[in-house]
Image: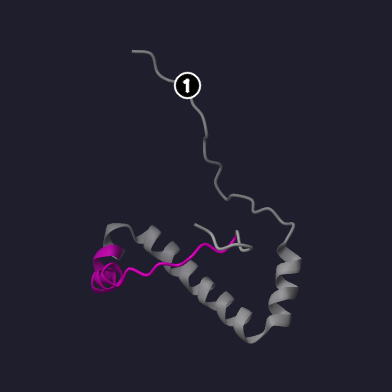
Amino acid sequence: MYRKGSELEPPIIEVRSLIDGLKDKRDALRKVNPHLYEAINKTMRYAALFRYVKANSPLSWNAFCAQVKDRLPEPSVVTPYSWEASSK
């Protein structure tokens, strides 16, 4: 459930046992799906940077948010969203 007045910020619930378990298996996760692992890693780094800027430079953060507010991301890969069912 979202906090009142903050639809874009869902509550964060930390599950320490899962976090610790994943930390211990980093190499295994990387081997299972290296592309996904790198995408997740890159996302975490950007998230940390954004949190840092938001906390330490609110004016810069607000200027950045104003610049990207009305922009829509363009996907780098077009993903099909429908297809014809095969007849058997």
Please state which amino acid type lies under the numbered disc 1: Glu
Residue shown at 72%/56% (left/top)?
71
User: What residue would you read off at disc 1?
Assistant: 84
Residue interval drawn in magenta:
8-29
Which colour assignment does the render follow?
Answer: one colour
Query: In the drawing, does residue 41 fall left or right of residue 47?
Result: left
Is residue 21 found inside the magenta-colored segment of the image? yes
Query: In the drawing, does residue 58 fall left or right of residue 88?
Result: right
Residue shown at 27%/58% (left/top)?
32
Circle count: 1
Residue shown at 49%/74% (left/top)?
45
Q: Residue 34 in the image: x percent, y percent?
A: 35, 61
Single out the residue that lies furthest toward the top.
88
Return the residue nearer the eye: 59 or 32: 59
Single out the residue that lies furthest toward the front.
4
Query: In the drawing, does residue 78 fall left or right of residue 73?
Result: left
- Crowding at label 1, few (<14), some or many (≥20) Cα neighbours within 10 Å? few
Q: Residue 16 in the image: x percent, y percent?
A: 30, 72
Residue shown at 64%/51% (left/top)?
74
Is residue 3 found inside the magenta-colored segment of the image? no
Q: Residue 38 in the image: x percent, y percent?
A: 41, 65
Q: Residue 31 in the image: x percent, y percent?
A: 27, 62
Residue 37: name its quadrant.
Answer: bottom left
**Circle 1: element type:** loop
Residue 53: name its quadrant.
Answer: bottom right
Quarter in which the C terminus is drawn: top left
